Image: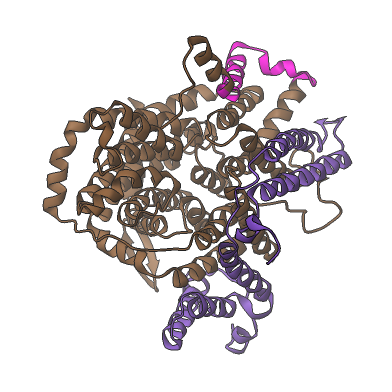
Chain colours: A purple, B brown
Amino acid sequence: MSGDGKAANQGPAHRNIELAAAGLMGVFAILVVYGALQAGIGWGFEGPKAGFFPFIMGSILLIATAVNLWNGWQGSKTKIFAEWDQLKQVGAVTIPIAIYIAAIPFIGIYVASVLLIAYFMMRISSYGAVRTALVAIGVPLLTFIVFERWFLVTLPKGPLEAVLGY
Amino acid sequence: MAEFVNLFNGFATVLAFQDVNIFGTTLSLPFNVFIMIVGIVLGVIIGVLPGLGGANGVAILLPLTFSMQPTSAIILLSCIYWGALFGGAITSILFNIPGEPWSVATTFDGYPMAQQGKAGEALTAAFTSSFIGAFFAVIMITLLAPMVAAFALRFGAAEKFAVYFLAFASFVGLSKEPPFKTLAAMLIGFALATFGTDHMTGSLRLTFGTEILLPGFDFLIAVIGLFGIGEILLTMEEGLKFKGKDAKINLRVVLQTWAKLPQYWWTYLRSCVIGCWMGITPAGATPASFMSYGIAKRVSKNGKNFGNGEIEGVIAPETAAHAAGKSALLPMLALGVPGSPTAAVLLGGLLIWNLQPGPMLFVENKEFVWGLIASMYLGNVVGLIIVLTCVPLLAAILRIPFGIIAPIILMFCAIGAYTVRNSFFDVIMMLAFGVLGYLLKKTNYPLAPLVLAMVLGDRAEEAFRQALVGSGGSLGVFFANGLVSSIMLLGFIALFWSVISAGISRVRGVKPATAG
């Protein structure tokens, strides 16, 4: 991260994130307006067509976004969004969550949860193996009993549950 | 007084014994009371834990109630809401960490009190104030809701839309975030609500030829993502330092504090009125608590000492927050317009249980409505007893490190998101909404209007289009009679309130007042 200048060393500029957020909203608004035009925004047999309302919403969103972009542009250039270390912390949670969700269709939500809890306890809170195993296996197991047995709610299950006969 | 007969029947519904099958044995229990206690306890825990709040706690548990009786289901979920309102105060006072946004103002004087060793006093004052605020709001609901509902029965499509317009316009005008950001957040919600099948014509829209977008976006997923995952990401960024103060609450402290409270009757009354007003207009509990704190600080003779552990600084925000939180149910029940994100989730529940929120509820589902209102009275009393007796236990929950709590909350978020529609795509969307929630929070966009717009989008659109169908496409229908015109006018005043109030101050030659 060297050579990024002084402000960039501490973290990304708030103004850039602000502009990016407004920009994303603008893209979304254009998408909505485009989709609404596809669905038809005129007057049909039963009154306004399906695209009528989303078209209005998308259009006003576009205007609001333009104002927000303008205000964001004039915002402070030195204020930082968050420090890089803080963002690393956020990443240290977001990436495991993404992997967790991606794993659910393959190994089921219970086994994935065991791994997620174990990761958090060992990596973020540095617990020992015994305590980690106790919580990481105990909590999903309890959840399994509550959901599958008591409330009869079926959640995604993987090969392990299949072996055990569920 | 028909209301009192109805309320009495409501109490009968709540207290009725039902045969319940538990582990194969059938027991006769006052099932709804049992549900109420479970709900309050769960709610307090949800309110205490970071990353779990009233709105997403209720959203996660909503799918579990699909098979329950609607009356029992709403009692469970609304009690979670009341519990969460109570729980927020505990973390604010003992840990200086507001468990809920509406308890931020409670930290200003609550935590200094705890530092001075007066935690028990602060907690007792907070709980009692919550109780009083909530009680005031429930009485108001009992008296006003049937009248508002009866009045709203006359509403046609145009009037219905005008009410939605007023609700959302007051968001833009009254929120502390920049108006165009509030507007943008709200419109994202409205736009998200239109994806998928158009309920009026049955045709598809905004699916872009994909199958994934056919069912549209469910607001419960948005709530779990925005408030649950987003909150955990924020907590990670801030780095959690849990250094709590010890609280000893015993009967003596409680009685001593209670003896002090009556002298603040004027603060109570004022905070109740502020809270109810802010709860009915969808400003919600958070601005209500700030406003009440700010006004109390300005008018109190101890105003200078606010921020250094003044008991009045705990009373004012807590009373207002609870009055607002409870009275948010008035417009939800009587008009179908929820006053807070959590009330919006409850409204979503009504739709899932096949109940139409709005004035007809008071005619067609009397047992449901009055059962709920009666449970609010009882839940409030039960809640006060539970929080006063369980503080040490609840503080212990807070001492469980984030490394254990966070993944368990994440697991429940994922389960909650999946069970809404048994869809894996929803779990992915939950994470997307989580990242979005983090970004929006950091860039000062309010989340509540987004969620409310997602819940009410379909209904607002339907009212808008029906009104236009009736008038043959003329916008004049929204100003066709005195009733609809005055609601629309109020809406426009609310929408441009910041401009109008600045103008008024300029005319008077005073600087625009900033809320403390």
Residue under the image location 73 percent in, 43 percent down:
B194
On the image, the x and y values in percent for residue B459 come to: 65, 36
Depth check, front residue: B429 or A68 = A68
Numbered-mark total = 0
Depth check, front residue: B176 or B203 = B176
Say whether residue B361 is visible.
yes
Residue B469 shown left or right of residue B242 in the figure: right
Image quarter in which the C terminus of chain A is found: bottom right
Residue B463 shown left or right of residue A112 in the figure: right
Q: Quadrant of residue B451?
A: top right
On the image, the x and y values in percent for residue A85 come to: 57, 65
The magenta segment:
B471-498
On the image, the x and y values in percent for residue B284 come to: 47, 37
Residue under the image location 60 percent in, 22 percent down:
B496
Q: Is residue B44 above or below residue B305?
A: below
Say whether residue B154 is visible.
no
Depth check, front residue: B362 or B179 = B179
Is residue B484 in the magenta section?
yes
